[in-house]
Amino acid sequence: MRAITVFLKTLREMSRDAWMLGLTLAFAPFFVLLYWMWFSGGSTTYNVILINQDIGAQSPAGSTFNAGDQVVEAIHEITYADGKPLLKVIYAADRAEAEPILKNRGAAAFILIPEDFSQTLQRLAGGDRSVTTNITFGGDVSNPYYMVAVNLALTGVDRYVQEATGQQPLIRYAEEPLGVSAARTEFETYVPGTLIFAVILLIFLASMTVAREIETGGLRRLQLTPMTSLDLLGGITAALLLIGAIAIALSFVVAIALGFRSLGPIWVAILVGTITSLSVIGIGMVVASFTRTVSQAFIVANFPMAIMMFFSGVIYPLPKVTVFAVGAREIGLYDLLPPTHAVVALNKVLTLGSGLGDVLYELAALTVLSILYFAVGVLLFRRFHLRSG
Amino acid sequence: MTTVLQARSLTKRYGPLTAVNNLTLEVYEGEVFGLLGPNGAGKTTSINMICGLLKPDAGQVCIRGQVITDGDASVRTRVGVCPQNVVLWGQLTCLEQMQFLGEMYGLRAKTARERGERLLNEIDLIEKKDKLARTLSGGMQRRLNLAMALVHDPEILVLDEPEAGLDPQSRVLVREYIKSLARHKTIIITTHNMDEAERMADRVAIIDHGKLLTVDTPEALKRTAGEGDVLEIEVDAGLAESALAAVSKIAPQISKTNHTLIIRARGVVELLPAILDALHSVNARPGEVRLRANTLEDVFISLTGRRLRE
């Protein structure tokens, strides 16, 4: 009963702090919008620099042709499922001109077509297997885009060379994407991560809301009542959970309005997000237990926030560090982080079209972690803030 | 007189520091009990133990004979505490926080709301009931702070410096309100303000270094500090010691602070010519001369000394 009173009071206070509430609710939808704008509503187009030094060749019919120019067309034919080009060609006369562009990350890689490229292709097409030539690729290999751009460009060049010479590849490779993952735009692949990012940030709101009660003396006043730590933290958690669920739902509304397609049921994704919120709020309660002021809570919350961001696979996947096994399932170190399960579950639902039954393990793991962190938070809070010393 | 609250041999230590040392006192039903002491004397620690916020290392607190034990929630509803620092939820209206706190004490929402309205009316804040607490003036916030301590209708009311930060009008209102409460409740006031204690308290306890120094009515305490009135005479600082020695032969109850002699005696005015002669004999020319009645502050200073506290 007292938890409901705290729940209503927390909601009332939040509703009157328009700036804070607005930021909390708008954060994830705003990031969805930012990503959409960043990817122009679709996916990244990688810039590659073409240094075409090909002097061309004369065909048996007497006309001249430049294979280097035709490579550009082949590269442009590599597109996303929606027809949007994967690569954009920028021209440079030589490497000296290309280098500053690469250093400034105006392009991910360069392709240098040699001067004998057309002649070599012509002789290969005529059956002369004694000739060869070198196409040079390069760029800043520390640029995360480099590998993608080079691989894609290689695919385009290789395809053109096979067509131009009439040679069959020794082995054909077929790609079979899982679900409809190939049809996903880059914007769509980032939406789940954005949602989890927003959920992770609830740790600040949770820890700071509790710390405010400590800092202002409200907790001291409440300590004089028969309230328990479960009443206080339960009420605050329920209010934050509602705010979190609304923020997630709003994010989906914005994402869908901007072209995001979920292959699985959205309600399952919202359920995953909401349970993840619960566990993140639980961690926020643990943080609040160790702090006495709002600024302390903010500073301390950065630590678990960073761990969740970088070690749960939200930003990039990490190798599993197995700690123990339950039956056939290996439990990794990062499985202690709620977002780890949320990433997997949201990917299954949103990208692979899974339903509730397919994410039961992740939901169970999230529920256990939520209960665990919340219980630890309640115990620590009672130990450090409510027990008479 | 019925004892409502009893502290028996309360002791609280923080490492090597003994904040409260074997404190024993009784508070009677319907009285206003003043708890006086300099900073760091152990007042707040004592109050926190009485409220159940702090567990004593030794001793116990009883309310109507029932021992308060750690975690005993039922006892908490019998005590209302008005903290010295204003503790309000700024984003709630006056009435909302009365209702919120009332519900946290276990009242039904309707009851808490009705009681909140009644208290706001009594403390002259009913017109502000729908205003956010953070928009109130400092004095209004202090009055609201006091009203919140009463929302659950406690049997014992603990007021920590209730007049601090109040303007004169609010001070009179709060003082009269506390006096009106005293008919129905037992009130414990901690304060530095001797006037406040003297005006309001039926009995006063003075504690220092965690120990109870004395407890009695203000009048009785004033008598213990010395009979009669107090004469204060300013003299040259360089001659204060010799002036003290000279005057002490006429009025033995004498002390000094910097360059002021403080002489306490029955019929002190009649001794004035002799005192002036004594000063003249040591070439100490009297400056300002003040005559006043014996106060509780004299008792306080005589018991706790003049040394500044942290």
Image: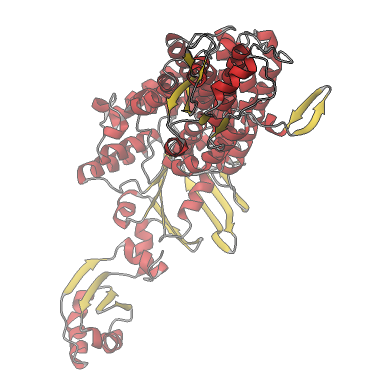
Residue ID at (33%, 81%):
B252
Q: Quadrant of residue A179?
A: top right
Residue ID at (33%, 61%):
B296
| Residue B11 image position (x, y, % from top left) | 58, 56
Whether residue A322 is visible: yes
Q: Out of A356 and B266, give the one closest to the viewer.
A: A356
Q: Out of A84 and B108, give the one closest to the viewer.
A: A84
Using the image, determine if residue B184 lies above or below residue A81: below
Using the image, determine if residue B172 lies above or below residue A58: below
Left or right: B207 in relation to A369: left
| Residue B285 image position (x, y, % from top left) | 16, 86
Left or right: B190 in relation to A140: left
Residue ID at (66%, 25%):
A131
| Residue B57 image position (x, y, % from top left) | 62, 53
Left or right: A126 in relation to B305: right
Q: Is the image coloured rainbow, by chain, by secondary structure, or in one colour?
A: secondary structure
